[in-house]
Image (cartoon, rainbow, N blue to C red):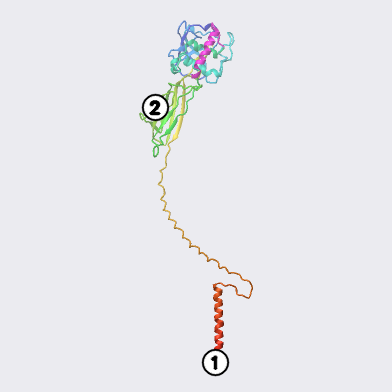
Amino acid sequence: MWAATVMALGVVLAISPTVLSHADTQRHVTWVPLSANHPGANLVRSADGARHSVCATDRQTDGTERGGAFTYSSSQIISPGQPYVSNAQTFMVTDAQRGSVEVITGDAAAQVAYLLDVGYNPARYPDAGYQLDPEAATAAVYVLAPRASGVTDPATFRAKGTETLTTIAPHVGPYSLPDPQITFDTAEAASPSTGVVRVSPPRSAAGTIMTGVALTVSLEGARTVEGDKAKVSVTSTTEPVDVPIHIDSEHVVASVSATGLPATTYEVWESPDHQDRLVTGEPTSLNARASADRPTKPQTPPPPSTPPTPATPPEPTPPPTPTPPPPVLTPTREATPQLAETGPIAQRAIGAGLALIGSGMLLTAWRARRRSA
């Protein structure tokens, strides 16, 4: 049973080079003893150091103390958010009964994956800034898989595991990789021939920038300014990395791949003859892509020639308005036999009348003289 194997002989797991990802794919492995005093629940690793494994809380006797070749008849790949439910054909729920139970919740999947990868092999992600001892990583696994039992001091074991989970929390996946940003040198007069691809670093589920990750930038329709290449490798830092480019086409595509991030999946290898085991998953790879059309600036036509505006002729000065003569005031007189005072015109009229009367009188006198003669 698992309780009897907590302090059992440690071994090395030699894994065949075949990539195993299907539930019905067999695993042929060789257990090699590691150390009589190795801590943990039968913690083992592959001969090349690529994978680590602990008991999946199956109550079967492990059998690794005998050494030799073993075959696992089936497997599961557990992804983030997916619970690990045991295989009723291979998993001993008790010392005498097989069954299907939820061993690890879906919420804990990414943490288990990280522990089985970086927790046991800090060199897988040295930028984490810490190095867990194997017992701390194992304790954390069994906080997440609470069926574990048989440790000498369960309270201390659990406290160590809980502390470890707090330590790794900033760097646990799932991980995200932002799309690259393509910008053009729009200061050029015509279509720009240079630009920049900005590559942002990947981030953990908690938003922590994952530094030290290998990033490959592939270009279509452009080349790097340095080296004149269509593909360039950079390493993620706390700030985005700018890659200057020459533009070769009207359409530019930038693809970024991040490789070697900590695992976000783990595997369960299953057998009806010996313990089902939790095993390190594959390192995480991410891809992001962006495209953009090169902007074109239309030729600016010269401003149209504007005919001169004719001068507005001055408006003619209107003739001066004649000043009317002052009104002639005609004095009024009383209706009496006496002549009223007259003005100049009346006086002339009176004078003319008197002259006519005088002429008439002279003519009458002359005629009288002729008759008398």
Membership of 150 in magenta stretch: yes
Q: Which of marks 2 and 1 is nearer the N terminus?
A: 2
Corner quadrant of residue 84 = top right
Tell me if residue 258 comes above or below residue 278 in the rendering.
below
What kind of element bears circle 1? helix
Label 1, residues with CA under 10 Å away: few <14, some 14-19, many ≥20 = few
**Residue reaching furthest to the left:** 227
Q: Which amino acid does label 1 sit on?
A: Arg
Q: Mark 1 points at which residue?
A: 370
Which segment did they paint magenta? 147-171
Q: Which of 279 and 108 lies nearest the eye of the viewer? A: 108
What kind of element bears circle 2? strand
| Residue under the image location 56 percent in, 82 percent down | 357
Magenta residues, dominant SS class: helix
Q: What residue type is labelled 2?
A: Val
Q: Do the residues labelled 2 and 1 touch (CB within 8 Å)?
A: no
Label 2, residues with CA under 10 Å away: few <14, some 14-19, many ≥20 = some
Q: Position of residue 239 (x, y in %)?
A: 44, 25
